[in-house]
Image (cartoon, helix red, strand yellow):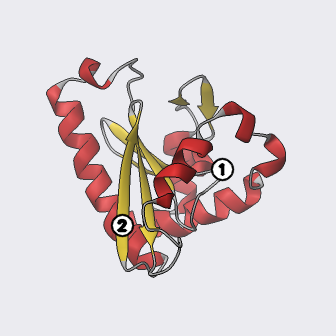
Amino acid sequence: MTEASWDFICEEMSFRFGQHLIKPSLVFLKTELSFALVNRKPVVPGHVLVCPLRPVERFRDLRSDEVADLFQVTQRVGIVVEKHFQGTSLTFAMQHVHIHVLPRKAGDFHRNDSIYDELQKHDKEVEDSPTLWRSEEEMAAEAAALRVYFQ
């Protein structure tokens, strides 16, 4: 799929992430039931999110086909971001009804489990100032680079 055809397919789509409307340029994979997007404030390079297309309040509200697709997409995305960002392992973390996928490298945190502390901070509003976010252009470029793996 070319960049132009991706834009055509997604221009009518609205991707919802909580109360946020996500621009198609930030999404690098879409299936019938899930989508993957770049992170505006990554904990490590390549930190991305995988979400169900249908917004739900709780994980238990997902249908079994949505759960299966969410985890299949997460596996595919993990393989790609580990390769693309030259990771040596992956960390997956589920927050609410989305999955954080983080490519890891040896020594990226002094204490390996400190990544979970950073993820806790990541989702707190006090720590989520727009001044800490990446530019839309930077995120769109990363999404475009990741999208080629799925074409």
Quadrant in which the C terminus appears = bottom left
Q: Is residue 150 above or below residue 53?
A: below
Residue 52 shows up from this direction: no
- In the drawing, does residue 146 fall left or right of residue 150? right
Q: Which residue is mark 2?
A: 90
Label 2, residues with CA under 10 Å away: few <14, some 14-19, many ≥20: some
Q: Which residue is mark 1?
A: 40
Residue 108 x/y as whole percent: 53, 75
**Residue sitting at 36 percent across and 66 percent down?**
90
**Residue sitting at 30 percent across and 26 percent down?**
59
Q: Is residue 39 above or below residue 54?
A: below
Quadrant in which the N terminus appears = bottom left
Is 38 or 141 nearer to us in this picture? 38
Residue 29 x/y as whole percent: 42, 52
SS of the residue under disc 1: loop
Amino acid type indicated by mark 2 = Leu
Q: Would you identify the image quadrant in which residue 145 lies?
A: bottom right
Mark before the other along the chain sequence, 1 or 2: 1
Label 1, residues with CA under 10 Å away: few <14, some 14-19, many ≥20: some
